Image (spheres, rainbow, N blue to C red):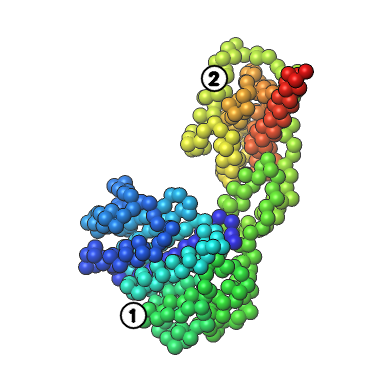
Amino acid sequence: MVVTDNFSVIFVGAGCPVASGSIGMRSFIEALELNIGDLRPTTVEGVERFESKWPFSRENFWTALEQVVQTWEPRPNIFFERSSSPHVRISVNLKEHVAGLEAWNIGLTVEPFSHFEEPQQVSVRSQRVLDLVRAWASWYPAHYGVAHSRADLDLAQSAGAFYSAETYETVHDIYWLNILGPQMVRRLGRERVLSTPAYLVEPLPPGGVLLVTRPTVADILSEEARLAQARALVHLRPDLRLEEVMSKLRERSRVLAREERRFEPDVGDLLDRIVESRPLVERPRMVAEFNRYQSPEADEWRPCEAALSPDVESPAREMLRYRRELPNRLLEKINMTELSLVPEALVQLDLHFWTEADEYAFGQPHLVRWLVPLAGAFLGEVMVRSLEGCWVPRKNLSEAQVLVGDRVYLPFVRAQRYLQSRQSILDYSLTKLYRSAERIAGVRGIQKKRRASSRSRH
């Protein structure tokens, strides 16, 4: 399927379900409890500013709902969440205006999408979603609704259109599950809608129609699923050509298809995060590019015989500056104070600087003066803490060293090379030097243990 994709349900209901009181949400919660299955939330949350969050139960739902109804803020929302995998988030907005019409909406997100691809559960899990949405749509009149891959919705540029007037003029795309409200059905022609070639076509009160293109959501990017979506769309929209619609759907499937990532191991985590941070349409090109990419060997090191001696007045005070003051200042300057001095933080720093390269104007003298010392100290201190290293402070920061095993490393020299451009963030990443040092230290440690074991046997 798709890397980091999730499954989304968007239900846009007509009117206000609590116009006659909170009891109007009874069918919502009953349908949720009956059909949610292994996606059951663990918490329910009322008014956000009150930070009111309770364990999920029907009783606590009514408590949260009463709080929201009584407060009735500009966007009266209730949230449900499941933090363990699969992660589930359900939002209910009780007040919305869509194309000049009073409305409300439900958003349900399940991450990862692969939850619906498990072979033994494909049919059961898709059926539960169908039953849940059918129950909501049978009780609450709907303007519109879909259930589909979130990534494909985004790629179709439809996500933001669900609450626009254009959505209710005609149908622009067909997905796995679709709810066409009475207004749209009238415009398209009720007989035409009910004769749509699809896996399931069901009338909904009071005049809407439920369309499901395939038995399960698991294969929505397959040729068969795309053909089902295209046939349904061109049936509803005779002005469209099947070949043209299929061409667009195939292109979306190509963009979303998982391409094998053969990234350089030392920087694989960083490259993965860069890819995932980019728009979907850019990802295939970036994956192909990064599959070919090989960063330069990290050469900011010397054999331990070349280690210098401290030449500062107070080595202890200078090491304290390296170990605390400079790393903390870096995190404060870039607003990432939540990071700790651990290897994973280096990947996050690399991603930050790569993403924000245009903001930093890398290579400028003023940047070198303040940022290189901070980044170099952070890198060096991570090596000290995680690789049992030791600082060798020097008056000239470019000479300052970190002793790890039988090598001394030059973190400030690495930082100088690193902070030159967006490309240099990749070529001289903090992560790469750390991983190289970690690998060498591990090999040396194994060799040392083997020699000690050999001597003990003799």
What is the x, y in percent for residue 178?
Answer: 46, 73
At 47% across and 36% down in the image, what residue appears? 338
Circle 2 sits on which residue? Answer: 320
Q: Which mark is residue 206?
A: 1
Q: Using the rendered view, name the quadrant where residue 188 is placed.
A: bottom left
What is the x, y in percent for residue 323?
Answer: 55, 24
Compared across the picture, whether 260 is left or right of 386 comes to right
- Note whether 444 is above or below 195 in the view shown: above
Disc 1 crowd rating (10 Å Cα; few below 14, some 14-19, many 20+) is some
| SS at badge 1 | loop
- Count of labels shown? 2
Question: Residue lying furthest front in this view?
Answer: 457
- Note whether 423 is above or below 193 in the view shown: above
- Note whether 432 is above or below 192 in the view shown: above
At 63% across and 68% down in the image, what residue appears? 251
The amino acid at mark 2 is Leu
Q: Using the rendered view, name the quadrant where residue 370 is placed.
A: top right
At 74% across and 39% down in the image, what residue appears? 296
Q: CA distance from mark 2 to mark 1?
A: 72 Å
What is the x, y in percent for residue 9?
Answer: 44, 65
Disc 2 crowd rating (10 Å Cα; few below 14, some 14-19, many 20+) is few
First in residue order: circle 2 vs circle 1: 1
Looking at the rendered image, the quarter that the C terminus falls into is top right
Q: Using the rendered view, name the quadrant where residue 29 is placed.
A: bottom left
At 48% across and 64% down in the image, what residue appears? 125
- Note whether 100 is above or below 111 in the view shown: below
What is the x, y in percent for residue 246?
Answer: 62, 75
The amino acid at mark 1 is Pro
